[in-house]
Image (cartoon, helix red, strand yellow):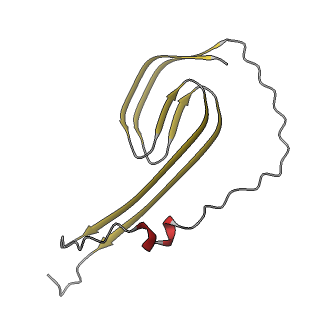
Amino acid sequence: MRISKVDDINIHALSFSSHLTIGDSAYINAKARALAVKREYPLFYGNEGNFLAFSLFTKPIPQPVITENVRMTVENPNSDIVVNTVNIKGISSSSVFQVGANKQIQADSRIKHIRQLLSSGEQ
């Protein structure tokens, strides 16, 4: 285990199941689901937020099959992870920013945008 040190960190926005981790963790599971409905004429019926109505939110995400054998040698000449300054505008939609070690990250972001515009004869 190593110690993570960050002198200065400035993040403007952290949202929608995103993670900021300073230090080690074993497992991060970040899941975000969003359904955005925009109508030119703002008439809403109250049932627009049903994720099950869209296959995007129910389909399993295919996982890659890893067939390569990876040989890795790690040398840590310093006992600490030291970071001077970090400036980030935004971390969003199941993203991860970490200073440290992690064994496994599972991140899933599913976003459906619906734009409903009036035809030229409607209004």
Q: Position of residue 30 (x, y in %)?
A: 51, 45
Q: Is residue 74 left or right of residue 49?
A: right
Count of marks, rendered view: 0
Name, please, the residue furthest toward the left.
Answer: 123
Q: Quadrant of the C terminus?
A: bottom left
Q: Is residue 58 left or right of residue 79?
A: left
Location of residue 102 by image quarter: top right
Q: Position of residue 77 (x, y in %)?
A: 72, 13
Q: Is residue 91 above or below residue 98?
A: below
Q: Position of residue 86 (x, y in %)?
A: 45, 25
Location of residue 23 by image quarter: top right
Query: What residue lies at 22% left-to-right and 79% top-to-bottom?
Result: 118
Q: Is residue 109 left or right of residue 35?
A: right
Q: Position of residue 20 (x, y in %)?
A: 47, 32
Query: What residue lies at 65% left-to-right and 61% top-to-bottom?
Result: 62
Query: What residue lies at 54% left-to-right and 52% top-to-bottom?
Result: 108
Q: Is residue 44 above or below residue 70?
A: below
Between 36 and 26, the one nearer to me in the picture: 26
Q: Is residue 85 above or below residue 93?
A: above
Location of residue 37 by image quarter: bottom left
Q: Is residue 84 above or below residue 49?
A: above
Q: Quadrant of the N terminus?
A: top right
Query: What residue lies at 68% left-to-right and 57% top-to-bottom?
Result: 63
